[in-house]
């Protein structure tokens, strides 16, 4: 495990602290092969992005985002090819669902990113310091592959990351939040995005199955299983004139009153024919101030890597398009353009 995950080796012959017969046996029965790199780009702000080809020729994307102070390097990892949940403002959702990634394909993204930066020689200088399951796909709908991959991220013989530095983001698959809590206690992020069920039904359709109350109750149960003092991260994508008004901030604050949480505001990342617009900088700051006045110190996620399309399925959407649904979507874009 150390050779593969810490040294980034893909050659059994190089694992010289193993006996020669064992190395030969391993080479006969096993293979170390990461996903193929189709595209690799570095943005002017240091954000690095990969489009990776997995087993059946599908493409997924992985993004490494260095913190401005140089202290963190956060890798954004995909869990599925496409996504079935169809959130109305999400470019991955528009690509439809193709398939679950295997555990190897998920950890392979960390392997590629770490290898490109260099081997993990010491814990103080890790190429990847944090992982967020916020790439393409809904990780809790691929539980059986996501959990073993996250366990490798935490394993001392694997990537050795602390459970606070591995974050799973979900749009709210309530029963699977409970199941996750039974297995491990990584950090949990919730894609809330709306302060009423009426609006959330529209933005995040899984809300029709598990509504806001059910989701927040699941968060409480998850936190109760964490042995330490933990908070849930509430993700709130701000969309112009949809959920960015003062009444929304007030409703949001009231909703979250009982929950130990921090709020992360994400200005909507526009993509062609989404039908939504990004709020102005001023409006984002106003929203943040309303929350502050209500007792919440919300952070605003700055957009990174814009020049390389490092956001939410946007690059894969451009590089390749494999689903019928995408074809229909593109057709509708063209129709609109006509
Ligand atoms: N499926 C999971 C994780 C992947 S999406 C989830 O939904 O939580 C990671 C985050 O980006 C989610 O909060 C998602 O709602 C948000 N997101 C998706 N499309 C976006 C866009 N166009 N602009 C801003 N945020 C977006
Ligand atoms: Fe899927 Fe998350 Fe996008 Fe919703 S926001 S469609 S759950 S990837």
Image: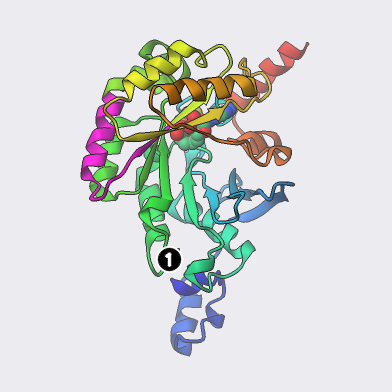
- Is 155 placed above or below 9 here? above
> Which residue is pictured at 53% across the width and 41% down the height?
135
Determine the residue located farthest toward the front in the rendered image. 293
**Label 1 belongs to which residue?**
158
Residue 196 in the image: x percent, y percent? 38, 14
User: Can I make out residue 324 in this image?
Assistant: no
The magenta-colored residue range is 214-234
Question: Is residue 319 toward the left or the right of residue 88 in the image?
Answer: right
Say if the magenta span includes residue 72: no
Determine the residue located farthest toward the right in the rendered image. 338
55 or 263: nearer the viewer:
263
Residue 21 in the image: x percent, y percent? 45, 88
16 or 257: nearer the viewer:
257
- Asked where in the image residue 318 lies, by quadrant, the reply is top right
> Which residue is pictured at 37% across the width and 64% down the height?
155
SS state under label 1? loop
């Amino acid at each position: 495990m150390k050779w593969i995950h810490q040294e980034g080796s893909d050659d059994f012959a190089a694992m010289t602290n193993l006996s020669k017969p064992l190395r030969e046996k391993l080479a006969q029965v096993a293979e170390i092969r990461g996903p193929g790199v189709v595209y690799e780009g570095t943005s002017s702000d240091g954000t690095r992005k990969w489009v990776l080809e997995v087993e059946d020729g599908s493409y997924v994307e992985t993004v490494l985002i260095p913190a401005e102070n140089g202290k963190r390097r956060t890798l954004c990892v995909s869990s599925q090819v496409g996504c079935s949940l169809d959130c109305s403002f999400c470019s991955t959702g528009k690509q439809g669902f193709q398939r679950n990634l295997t555990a190897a394909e998920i950890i392979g993204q960390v392997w590629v990113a770490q290898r490109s930066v260099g081997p993990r020689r010491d814990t103080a200088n890790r190429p990847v310091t944090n992982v967020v399951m916020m790439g393409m796909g809904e990780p809790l709908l691929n539980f059986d592959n996501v959990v073993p991959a996250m366990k490798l991220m935490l394993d001392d013989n694997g990537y050795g990351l602390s459970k606070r530095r591995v974050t799973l983001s979900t749009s709210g698959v309530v029963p699977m939040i409970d199941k996750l809590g039974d297995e491990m206690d990584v950090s949990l992020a919730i894609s809330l995005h709306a302060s009423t069920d009426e609006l959330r039904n529209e933005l995040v359709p899984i809300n029709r199955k598990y509504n806001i109350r059910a989701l927040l109750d699941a968060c409480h149960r998850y936190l109760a299983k964490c042995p330490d003092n933990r908070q849930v991260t509430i993700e709130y994508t701000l969309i112009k004139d949809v959920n960015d008004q003062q009444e929304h901030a007030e409703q949001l604050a009231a909703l979250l009153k009982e929950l130990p949480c921090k709020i992360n505001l994400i200005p909507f990342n526009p993509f062609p024919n989404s039908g939504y617009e990004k709020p102005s900088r001023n409006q984002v700051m106003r929203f943040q101030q309303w929350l502050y006045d209500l007792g919440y110190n919300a952070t605003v996620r700055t957009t990174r890597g814009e020049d390389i399309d490092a956001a939410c399925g946007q690059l894969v959407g451009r590089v390749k398009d494999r689903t019928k649904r995408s074809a229909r979507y593109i057709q509708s874009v063209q129709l609109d353009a006509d």
